[in-house]
Amino acid sequence: MASGRTDKTDGYRPISCTTYDHYEIWAMRRTLLSISYGNKQETTRIVTLKVVDGVEYAVLENGDDVRLDLIQEVLEA
């Protein structure tokens, strides 16, 4: 996995299906996004979504794998 991965799986909180659908659409359309997670804010694209051991991740164009429940804000850039 990429070095930027947020890999704590304890306390994982599944996100809503509606929010997941937004992530899928942004990935499919290759939308440039401003994404805030942890103490980072990145302008990047979602390459794909994946599930590892029941935890959902966004794989970002910048190389980070980010747990979806740890994303604080997403804005179209």
Image (tube, rainbow, N blue to C red):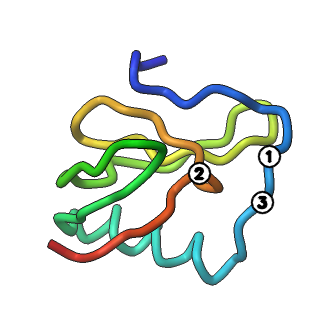
Q: Are marks 1 and 3 in contact (CB under 8 Å)?
A: yes
Amino acid residing under circle 3: Pro
Amino acid residing under circle 2: Leu
Using the image, tell me which numbered label, if any, was put on residue 12.
1
Q: Is residue 41 left or right of residue 55?
A: left
Which residue is identified by label 2? 70
Q: CA distance from mark 1 to mark 3?
A: 6 Å
Q: Nearer the viewer, residue 28 or 18?
A: 18
Question: Residue 55 at what x, y percent from top left?
Answer: 73, 42
Q: CA distance from mark 2 to mark 3?
A: 10 Å
Q: Residue at x 33, y 59 (%)?
A: 35
Which residue is identified by label 3? 14
Image height of 61 relative to 7, above or below: below
User: Does label 2 or label 1 sit earlier along the sequence?
Assistant: 1
Q: Residue furthest right?
A: 11
Using the image, tell me which numbered label, if any, was put on residue 23.
none
| Helix, strand or loop at mark 2 | helix
